[in-house]
Amino acid sequence: MSVPRFVRSACRWLALLLAVSMLAACAGVKVSPRDSRDYMSLRRGDVLSTGHLSTPTVAALQVVGLEAEACDTAGEDCRAALGRPDGLSEEQRLSALAELWLQAALDLERVQPQDGVAIAAAYLEAARHAYAYLFFSRRGPGERALEDRQTQVRDYYNFAVQQLVSGLFERYHDSPQARPEGSEGVQLELAGWRVHGHMSEVRLARGRSVPDALLPAASLSFSGMRNQYRRDGLGAELVAVTDKRVVKGGSEELPWSETPFPAVSMVAAFPGETLAAVLATREAHITGYDPYRRDSVRLAGVDVPLAADFTSGYGLWLARSGFASQALLTLVGQGEVLQQPHVYLLQPYDPQRRIVVMLHGLASSPEAWINVANEVMGDESLRRNYQIWQVYYPTNAPLAVNNQAIREALAATLAHFDPAGTAPASQGMVLVGHSMGGVLSRLMVSSSGERLWEAVQEKYALEGRRRERAEKMLAPYLRFEPLPGVGRAVFIAAPHRGTPFAENTLSRWAASLVRLPVSLLGRLTEVTALLVAPGSASAAPVLRPLNSIDNLSDQDPFVRLAAGLPISPAVPYHSIIGNDTPELALRDSSDGVVPYASAHLEGAASEKVVASWHSVQETPEAILELRRILHAHLAGMGAGAAGMMAAAAGD
């Protein structure tokens, strides 16, 4: 039976439509919506952030006829294929090879962690190809400044140097295989590479020439710190560890110490004047820099920013300090009691940076300044011009004793680092004190004259040899002048006239627990015996010396006398005061511990009242005010006292 003509025609059209649709399915492009969360992963996703090769590297592999999946098992072949110039620009080839070598190193760390030599060699190759891309491809770093790919390759370099240095140090720092080169560091030979390394610019604590460990800053995270401050640039951000223990109670020989965890920025350079020479070399020069002293380095004739982490060393110091427990135990005379004030330098001493001295309060420690110090050093301008010293002192000791002992500790520290007293660091220091530390800061910028000694003499009617002995013994505590070199003071929640809080039931109970070190107790007992005449009914010397909580009472004779001592007219001073009683008039307010009337000082260059409890120093408002004052201090340096006061008054 014949098929009707119209049926045959319909079948032909149907076949044609099917063929066309099949061809369209094979060659057509389809579009589908993409989530906005994919935006960054498409542009910055790579072996470091996602565990997969970046889009530019995948594209480079496809140009030479390879698929990214094949490189997971045949990485050497993929790298060899990319090494040929066919179809790829220098930048495409070098950046892709840097990532592929980084992938190889990460894979080795995962499956063969014991093969340190192969891992180091892979990281060296990753760093070298990234270095070649950055400095020896057709365009320089400045021409690619806004390109995502350059940022990725910079990260490959930084990470490769970080892992290379920390891994080699862990494996070889105490091995005879690392041959010294005098004061210039070490030399290693591995897998055909010769690696030179030194960090002579970095000053390590306690006279050390080699740290115990080099920790990647990126591997450290901290709770209790609001922000982690760093500087973008080239180099591995590390922390050098020179001591396992920060606080040693009364066993420390010196009254000061530099940070045992200095920041280090490491940079690797590969010899060669041309791209071919750099890719042919088997030599690497690794240099460690102090990022506080240097903010850029010159590599291959180009000045580039030096990467840095300014928080991790400080955070590690606090985390390993044990300050909180020791401060409380010292107050009650238990455990390894802190005997004397100790000055902690938060970075290696720099003669060109002004010093900010921070003093904590009762039953406290440098932990009182966790975010204050970090936020101050997070300010680029302040970091370039200041260094922070924190004084840790036994808060069980009376104010008069701590005033004298802290003065001695600071003087000894300055004399060690600047014997001639001519460095900028020794001039224009800023004292910042919280609570009891604020009272001590005020004493250190005040002049006692004869006022305190005359009060003692009047109360106890001292005469003859008894007077001579008492005067000799008490002179260091009762006669003092403003501490030399101080250019400004900031008092935070400071009970200059004492506080009634020290007289309530809870405080009296706490006061009964306070214990002094035996050595100090013996000295003060001797003073008491000397002051009280034989047969006298009086048994309470003017210092009330056996109780630091009593010392902060608004009834304490020493505090009441000290409140009237004149502050040096050459030292502008500022008040930051907490107010936890907003329902009251300011003059009647309090931070819950210290009344406004006690914290307020006439003649202050500025006064900032912050809605806060007694720990006002940690509030953002107080930190901003302190930063403002420090900026003003810099602006006013050299303008004389009147000019500095006007600058600091601001507004």
Image (cartoon, grey):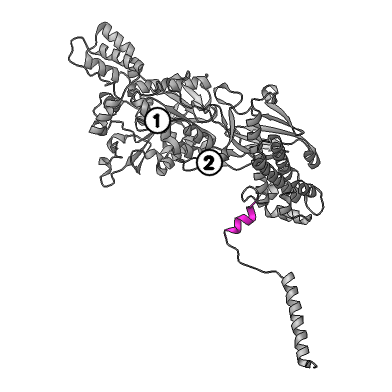
Q: Which residue is at a point 54% across and 22% down the rendered structure image?
A: 206
* Image location of residue 307, percent across then percent down: 61, 39
* Image location of residue 126, percent across then percent down: 71, 42
Task: Say if 235 sits above or below 260 in the image.
Answer: below
SS assignment at label 2 = loop
Q: Quadrant of residue 522?
A: top left
Q: Which residue is mark 1?
A: 325
- Direction front: furthest residue: 1
| CA–CA distance in space, label 1 to label 2 | 27 Å
Q: Decide if residue 576 is in sight here.
A: yes
Q: Is residue 580 magenta?
A: no
Q: Is residue 85 left or right of residue 518?
A: right
Q: Is residue 424 left or right of residue 121?
A: left
Write down the region rendered in magenta: 36-46
* Image location of residue 328, percent across then percent down: 36, 29
Q: Is residue 41 magenta?
A: yes
Q: Which residue is mark 2?
A: 229
Give the mark nearer the N terminus: 1 vs 2.
2
Badge 2 amino acid: Tyr
